[in-house]
Image (cartoon, grey):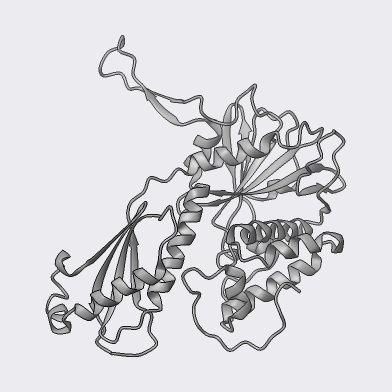
Amino acid sequence: MVFPQIERNSLEFSRISEPMYKYLSRSSRLEAKYIRNIVDIWFSHYPIHAQKELLANLQTLNDQQFLSAFFELYLHEMLLKMAFEIKIHPTLENDILKTPDFFVKDDVNEFYLEAKLSTVLSIDEIKGKKRLEDILNEINKIYCENFFVHVKIDGYPNSSVSIKRLRIVIIRWLEALNYEEIVRLENEYSKQIDLNIQLEGCNLVLSPKPNKTREKGKTLIYSESHSFSLLKTKETIRKAIHKKNSRYGKFEKPYILAINVLSPVCDYEDVFEALFGSDQCVFDPNKPDDEPPRNIRARDGKWKKDFNTRLSGVFIIKTLNPWTFTQKDMTLYLNPWARYPYRGKLLDFPHFSPDHGVMEYVDGIKPSQLLGLSRNWSGK
């Protein structure tokens, strides 16, 4: 079993910085129970000889490690439902000691499948995000009878912060606020009453909101907002492909990379630009002004006729996690120049396939249908 068999009575939502496994283990909420049941069932289907390593990765307090293990478990169950025979971390015929996640076969096809998380955050940003979550969690522990706060966030702290000193600053600010004045200014935003906290690499602005019910036990933060940042989804997909494309040497069989893109935005064009190059408009100064520009692909894509041909295709799924897995779709993008093209049962999923120089879309089944997953937490 992945989760402990204990009595649970907590109906609280997940705390800001609480690891996913820790929350799922303690929560008695209906959705948490549903997730635990599904994960335990899937884990029981995983080969016994490989369960120890996977269990350690599922029971971690590191969310990136947990999500990676959850994604592997999800893919394994999906392959089982398709009646594939699966070998975990297969030994390769070459001299490479590293091994891909799965060797998969049926009566007709054999292929390798590797799972990979792709996040828009760098390693430093992930560390900074964890520091920020710890800070917000500590702010939430401050009890104030008169006010809640809205927190506007810009950036991530790139060094440790004295939580004790920060608490003192916030408490003194809250105590100095005049409740009647804040009620009067509730619909008239004023920077003068805000608390601006400048950290190394991060800026927090706390704005007070009157607590008209004066209920105890409420968290201090009632809402958050983050400053605009340019998403680099296509770059993160390229990095995932670059890291995994040649990691295991040359294969003599099709090789599929499944990528869980942890980005709030990831559409077909993001994937196409990652694979085939950024979309560009080219103007020819020697042609008439009324002649439209040509649309071409830049040479920054990961797939070319003579480049990265060992990768047969990529499976893309967006922000798969324990709270979204019942509603996620997967799309397979086939490499037109693959040394070993894939032509198997994975084409039952939605996919883009090369056809006379064009990537044609073909609709297919949803993972939730294949896995028999309910789209609501009651299981109905």
Q: Quadrant of the C terminus?
A: bottom right
* Viewer-nearest residue: 191 or 93: 191
Question: In the rendered view, would you say 76 is above or below 326?
Answer: above
Q: Residue at x 64, y 61 (%)?
A: 66
**Residue 121 in view, yes or no:** no
Question: In the rendered view, would you say 344 is above or below 133?
Answer: above
- Side of 103 relative to 369 (left or right): right
* Viewer-nearest residue: 361 or 133: 133
Q: Residue at x 56, y 37 (%)?
A: 238
* Viewer-nearest residue: 108 or 79: 79
Residue 305 percent across, percent down from the top left: 63, 23
Question: In the rendered view, would you say 257 is above or below 226?
Answer: above
**Residue 269 in view, yes or no:** yes
- Side of 312 relative to 172 (left or right): right
Q: Residue at x 46, y 70 (%)?
A: 16
Residue 125 percent across, percent down from the top left: 47, 51
Q: Residue at x 66, y 57 (%)?
A: 71
* Viewer-nearest residue: 99 or 338: 99
